[in-house]
Amino acid sequence: MIPVPGQHDRVYPFMAHSDYYYLTEQQSPGGVLAIDLADDSETPWRAFAPEVTQAHRTWEGDVSWEGAPLAELSAWLVERRGRAVVMLGCPVGGYGGGVDTKLSAELAEALLHARRVLDELEIGLMRKAAAATAAGHAYAHRVLTSGEAAGMTERQLQVEIEAEFFRNGADGTPYDTIVGSGPNAAVLHFAPGDRVISKGECVLVDSGASYKRYAGDVTRTWPVGGPTQTQRDVINIVIDSEEAGLAMCKPGVEWHDVHRRCSEVVLDGLIGLGALKGDAAEMVERGVAGLFFPHGVGHMIGLGVRGAGGRLPGRAPRKGPGGVGVRVDIPLEVGHGFTVEPGLYFIPGLIDVAETREKFGDAVQWGVVDSLRKEIQGVRIEDDVVITEGGCENLTAGIVKGLD
Ligand code: GLY
Ligand code: MN
Ligand code: MN
């Protein structure tokens, strides 16, 4: 438990490491899962959990954690001195000499790869998260497209969306809800505040519900009231890009290639609007896409919003197409959970830079860009999929994304 500085007995909310939770389904602060590699019995695993005290019962109610008392861990380790003992889901230092840190890291890596493939139980939990997520987004869609949300603050909209999640089965939110209205939609992870939403602007809502720590993560971008033609065009570019990404989600496809394809569709859309000149594929490699779509096309999802993630064993870290950071670097496999979430933003910090304008002056028609951004500043469209034999199942397909 980590104390909040200056707040006496307050601590930050505790969240057990995903590996620990995956194997024990419990959130016991300080809990440890240890395995004696020389033990060839059926149960070489040993869970140690903090003892439930009177204080726990008084302040937190009827908590119960399975496992031997944590106080017995040291003696258990001493008995095994000289044998290979590994631990998961906890900092392995600090328990004395008995723990093999190198083997613990190798086991954690192996578990990460194993956890990438979601089983039926996990997919069931994701469906529950997706259903609650859908209810919140249905509310946002209704009040934004009808114009009813005009006059609400971003914070009010956030609270109402989250209330819908909880009314519809959620037991948490896997990340802080993002509601960016008007220019705030050009901030990738904008924290909703007291800005009042107005008719005629667009609002980006990136929000999800969770259930038993399994996550939903969905983004929609809506005009408040009817869209202008420019708003419609820009939103449709991102919808087309996302659809192209979803169509690529099949076993064997490299995640970086999904990113490349989605980037090309965004640039083709901008070419269509006269904002770019040239060949989309070449411009992606040159870094033009990164000016308008500066994040990876998605991430693994499942137990937590970032799921298991990572790279294939043996793969060195590398940037994505055109130098954009695409952290996940694996080919897709049946059972993988992914978000697909391309975006198109006009971010002042990226495009209002004199050298950038000059460097890309042959490709980017800056006058057209400046005119588009008067009406719409940021769009992202995001769904959650599970890879299947024939392609993927979009768990959040029921959440409307197209403009009427
Ligand atoms: N929902 C935040 C993200 O996708 O990064
Ligand atoms: Mn996401
Ligand atoms: Mn998201």
Image: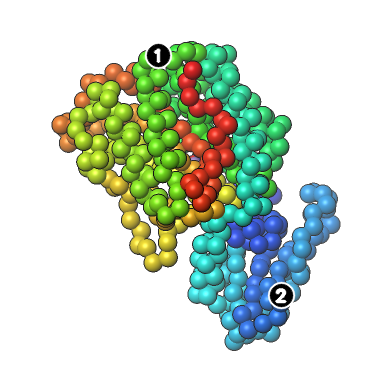
Res. 356 image quadrant:
top left
The secondary element bearing badge 2 is classed as: loop
Q: Residue at x 54, y 19 (%)?
A: 144
Q: Which mark is residue 260?
A: none
Distance between mark 2 and mark 1 Cα atoms: 63 Å
Q: Spot the residue most to the bottom.
A: 82
Mark 2 and mark 1 lie on one chain; the one further toward the N terminus is 2
Counting from the top left corner in percent of width and height, residue 171 is at: 69, 41
Q: Residue at x 67, y 44 (%)?
A: 211
With respect to residue 171, does 402 lie above or below? Answer: above
Residue 303, visible in the rendered structure: yes
Counting from the top left corner in percent of width and height, residue 374 is at: 34, 18
Counting from the top left corner in percent of width and height, residue 234 is at: 37, 24
Q: Taking 255 as reference, is 208 left or right?
A: right
In the picture of the structure, the residue carrying the numbered disc 2 is 43
Counting from the top left corner in percent of width and height, residue 340 is at: 46, 41
Which amino acid does the dot numbered 1 rest on?
A: Thr
Q: Residue at x 79, y 54 (%)?
A: 63
In the picture of the structure, the residue carrying the numbered disc 1 is 228
Q: Taking 97 as reference, is 163 left or right?
A: right
With respect to residue 159, does 38 lie above or below? Answer: below
